[in-house]
Amino acid sequence: MWKGRGPAAGTQARGEGTQLCQKCFNPGHWTYECKNERVYVRRPTRTQQLFNPQVRQRFADPADQPPRTEGEILREKRDKEAKKRAKQIAKIREKMFAGNKDAKKKKKASSDSSSSSSSSSS
């Protein structure tokens, strides 16, 4: 009448090492068989997940992940391009400021030599 009920039926029907207790998170038994104390696992709230997608829990198996939406794909592509542009701009600025620093050094060196020669002639 009650097929699949009882401690023996649940453990043998499914693989031995695959079940994970939801109470203590140890493998080898089911929650209703657990004699351990409950383990507290802090998880982010739904609001925190919405405001910061990085704290969202990831799927254990990559095959179980839902398909990416078109918006996610476009957002990733846009972010990648923005990072690439930022690197290019940083390189250009570095070259520009490197040229200015060299010019300032030359100008300072020439002003130091002219001021030392004018002070020695006095």
Image (tube, rainbow, N blue to C red):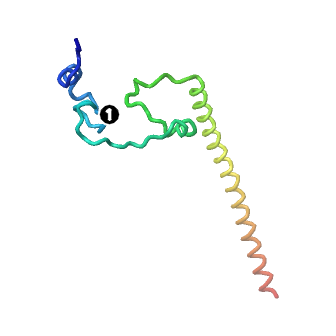
Q: How many marks do you count on the picture?
A: 1
Q: Which residue in the structure is indicated by mark 1?
A: 22
**Residue at horizontal 25%, vertical 34%?**
27
The image quarter containing residue 109 is bottom right
- Horizontal side of 13 relative to 116 (left or right) equals left
List x then y, in percent, for residue 90.
Answer: 65, 47
Residue lying at the far right of the rendered structure: 122
Pick the residue in front: 79 or 68: 68
**Residue at horizontal 56%, vertical 35%?**
50
Q: Quadrant of the N terminus?
A: top left
- Horizontal side of 94 relative to 54 (left or right) equals right
Task: Name the residue type under label 1.
Answer: Gln
Pick the residue in front: 27 or 93: 27
Q: Secondary structure at mark 1?
A: loop
- Horizontal side of 7 relative to 93 (left or right) equals left
Residue lying at the far bottom of the rendered structure: 122
List x then y, in percent, for residue 7.
Answer: 19, 25
Give neighbour class at mark 1: few <14, some 14-19, many 20+ (Cα, 10 Å): some
List x then y, in percent, for residue 75.
Answer: 60, 30
The image quarter containing residue 121 is bottom right
